Image: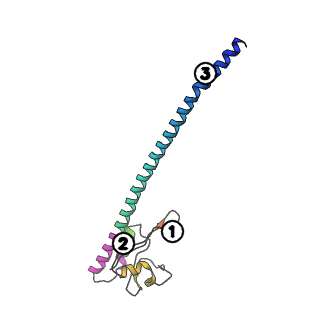
Amino acid sequence: MSFDRLKAKLIITFILISSVPLIFFATVVYRKEAELVRKKVLSHLESIVDQNTLMVEEFHIERTRDLNLLALTTQEIGGECNTTHLNKMHQEHKIYRHIFMANKEGSIICQNGTKPVFGRRLVDQPWFKTAAQGKSFVGDVASSEIKERYDLLIAVPL
């Protein structure tokens, strides 16, 4: 065996022997770092979800307060529905697509706009039953027929 051939084999052997721990160490570090990054991303996403949840809850509270104020105002003026007041509220708060008031029998007594509200009788609706019991109702957020818009049904008793 020649000296050059022995030298080449020794160099290859040393490179392989020294590479195994290096590859092992790199694999361990990569996995640990990947797990750390994954945990940080999940933590960040959880905080974003928590913030958005708070914003949605505050939105629900604000809308319910708006409608409670509308109900109190209607009571203050003797229980008569004021369409002008509904229209102003609708114009001022662009968030509302439709505002209406109904009596205990489920008949709409006033509304902003003329479009029909629901195809079925109002008294059969779960939100109407809740409001008839004297409680506020906040429905689930549902996608709207309008692109990139969502609907939320809120009912408050007068």
Work out which quarter of the rendered image holds the N terminus and state it.
Answer: top right
SS of the residue under disc 3: helix
Which numbered disc, 2 or 3, marks the residue that appears first in the sequence? 3
Q: Nearer the viewer, residue 113 or 23?
A: 23
User: What residue is pinned by disc 3?
Assistant: 14
Dot 3 crowding, Cα within 10 Å, few <14, some 14–19, many 20+: few
Q: Is residue 15 magenta?
A: no
Please state the horizontal and vertical placement of residue 86, each as a whole percent of the image: 37, 75
Q: Amino acid at mark 1?
A: Ser
User: As displayed, is residue 61 above or below residue 44?
Assistant: below
Residue denoted by label 2:
88
Compared across the picture, whether 14 is left or right of 115 comes to right
Picture coordinates of residue 105, whole percent (x, y): 40, 88
Amino acid residing under circle 2: Lys
Q: At which x and y percent is residue 58?
A: 35, 63
Q: Residue at x 40, y 62 (%)?
A: 56
- Decide if residue 46 is on the left or right side of residue 9: left
Q: Is residue 129 left or right of residue 115?
A: left
